[in-house]
Image (tube, rainbow, N blue to C red):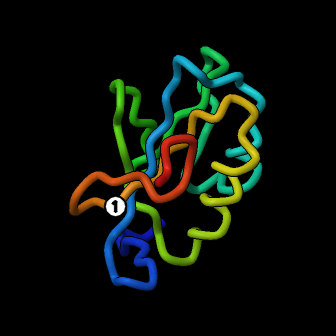
Amino acid sequence: MTVQQETRSGGEALEVWIDQDLCTGDGICAQYAPEVFELDIDGLAYVKGPDEELLQARGAATPVPLPLLTDVVDSAKECPGECIHVRRVLDKVEVYGPDAE
């Protein structure tokens, strides 16, 4: 996975994080974007850092790589737990997910 961040039409970088308190462990996110999401031994999904290491700190976010934007957005839309949040890096405004404007 590259460190290149996704940019939307306005050119802003995006990041994604998962609220494990709401994660149902269905693994849909890991099916859509295994480069970004992974289920851990606890049965919950986590985002991966650019080094592919699981980021397990509460609220940990990772950049959304441009080639994976559609897969990450589809993950957020299809997630039964509504726990995937995609936000702009600059101002932390959610653009995809349950709290999107």
Give the vertical position of 37 relative to 42 (above or below): below
Residue at the image point whose x is 58% and y is 45% from the top = 37
Apparent side of residue 84 relative to residue 4 in the rendered image (left or right): right
Residue at the image point whose x is 71% and y is 25% from the top = 25
Q: Quadrant of residue 59?
A: top left
Name the residue at the front extreme.
101
Apparent side of residue 78 relative to residue 88 in the rendered image (left or right): right
Q: Quadrant of residue 29?
A: top right
Mark 1 packing: few (<14 Cα in 10 Å), some, or many (20+)? many
As rendered, which of 13 and 3 lies closer to the eye? 13
Query: Residue 70, position in %: x, y?
Result: 65, 69
Name the residue at the left extreme.
90
Residue at the image point whose x is 28% and y is 52% from the top = 92
As rendered, which of 29 and 22 lies closer to the eye? 22
Give the vertical position of 66 relative to 23 (above or below): below
Query: Residue 68, position in %: x, y?
Result: 58, 69
Name the residue that disc number 1 marks.
Answer: 88
Q: Hey, what amino acid is under mark 1?
A: Arg
SS class, disc 1: strand
Apparent side of residue 85 relative to residue 31 in the rendered image (left or right): left
Residue at the image point whose x is 62% and y is 60% from the top = 73
Apparent side of residue 25 relative to residue 41 in the rendered image (left or right): right
Query: Residue 22, position in %: x, y?
Result: 59, 22
In this rendering, the count of numbered labels is: 1
Q: Quadrant of residue 30?
A: top right
